[in-house]
Image (spheres, helix red, strand yellow):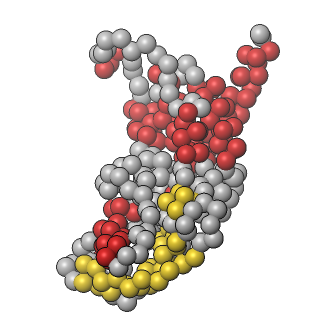
């Protein structure tokens, strides 16, 4: 059972420290007293204040919005991407999810596609590369049109909205035994491919994004850990849609290429 509101708990932190991408890493142990109402990142902030006060190097970790929107805060907590609470980014996790006396192991996301920059901070730029190779639509917007001029079926609109909820944190990659990025890629492909505005580049976009993904990440073998770890609960259904569209894209794009 989680700790009660307002109390102070004492935890042992086992934190991964690594001086740089090519340095050997190690775990270091810290004792921390923290309010159960504090967020996990506030706990790391407090730890860093203590380290600074003692003249020690603070723990490097990433964060920005601290509202579960930007996705930069992700770390492994006791072997789980973003920690023990489902549908929660690391920045939304509170210390009340832990008990007094707990040992908490904090590591960076572990994946070949996410090299460690320092301590808990990793390089997620391969996800940006996937988006660069197709995450856009090239339409002339002009003046704003009436909302009902482009009819969109509600089912498609709802699914596109669900896919667009992906914050690109990389938890799906970190949780996957193969370090696959299919859930992330399928969300980015899906939220455009499901809408009328995304049809012009649908097939070229799908092929380009999938093949860029394969340069950096492993292959999906349907373990399902990605969806379980996703703070936005992106459905595995999007991977099925991605696989279908990729097969269609290969056929369509090859047919188009043979005509030129």
Quadrant (top left, top right, bottom left, bottom right) of the N terminus: bottom left
Q: Nearer the viewer, residue 17 or 149?
A: 17
Give percent across and percent down for residue 214: 69, 44
Q: Is residue 101 above or below residue 79?
A: below
Which of the 4 quarters of the picture holds residue 66? bottom left
Query: Where is residue 88 shown, x and y percent of the image?
Result: 39, 61
Along the line of sight, the residue nearer the viewer: 158 or 257: 257
Q: Is residue 56 above or below residue 136?
A: below
Q: Which residue is drawn at 65% across and 42% down?
A: 213
- Residue shown at the point (60%, 49%) measured from the top left: 181
Q: Could you tell whether 25 is left or right of 14 in the image?
A: right
Q: Which residue corresponds to the image point at 43% horizontal and 47% vertical from the top-left? A: 167
Is 249 rendered above or below residue 71? Answer: above
Q: Nearer the viewer, residue 89 or 226?
A: 89
Which image quarter is the C terminus in? top right
Compared across the picture, whether 123 is left or right of 142 comes to right
Residue located at (43% from left, 40% from top): 164
Taking 75 as reference, is 215 left or right? right
The answer to whether residue 238 shows anywhere in this view is no
Most extreme residue toward the left is: 6
């Amino acid at each position: 059972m989680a700790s009660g509101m307002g109390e102070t708990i004492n935890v042992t932190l086992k934190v991964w420290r690594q001086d740089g991408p090519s340095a050997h890493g190690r775990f270091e142990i810290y004792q921390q007293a923290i309010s159960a109402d504090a967020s996990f990142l506030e706990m790391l902030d407090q730890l860093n204040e203590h380290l600074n006060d003692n003249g020690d190097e603070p723990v490097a970790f990433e964060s920005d919005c601290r509202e579960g929107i930007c996705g930069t805060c992700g770390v492994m907590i006791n072997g789980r991407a973003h920690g023990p609470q489902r549908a929660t980014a690391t920045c939304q996790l509170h210390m009340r999810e832990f008990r007094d006396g707990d040992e908490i192991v904090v590591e960076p996301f572990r994946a070949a596609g996410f090299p460690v920059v320092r301590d808990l901070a990793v390089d997620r730029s391969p996800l940006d590369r996937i988006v660069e190779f197709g995450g856009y639509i090239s339409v002339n917007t002009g003046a704003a049109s009436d909302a009902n001029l482009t009819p969109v079926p509600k089912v498609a609109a709802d699914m596109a909205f669900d896919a667009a909820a992906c914050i690109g944190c990389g938890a799906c990659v970190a949780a996957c035994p193969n370090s696959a990025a299919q859930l992330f890629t399928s969300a980015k492909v899906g939220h455009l491919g499901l809408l009328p505005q995304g049809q012009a580049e649908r097939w070229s976009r799908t092929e380009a994004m999938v093949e860029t993904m394969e340069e950096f990440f492993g292959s999906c073998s349907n373990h399902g850990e990605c969806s379980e770890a996703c703070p936005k609960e992106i459905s595995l259904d999007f991977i099925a849609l991605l696989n279908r569209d990729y097969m269609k894209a290969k056929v369509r794009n090859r047919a188009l290429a043979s005509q030129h």
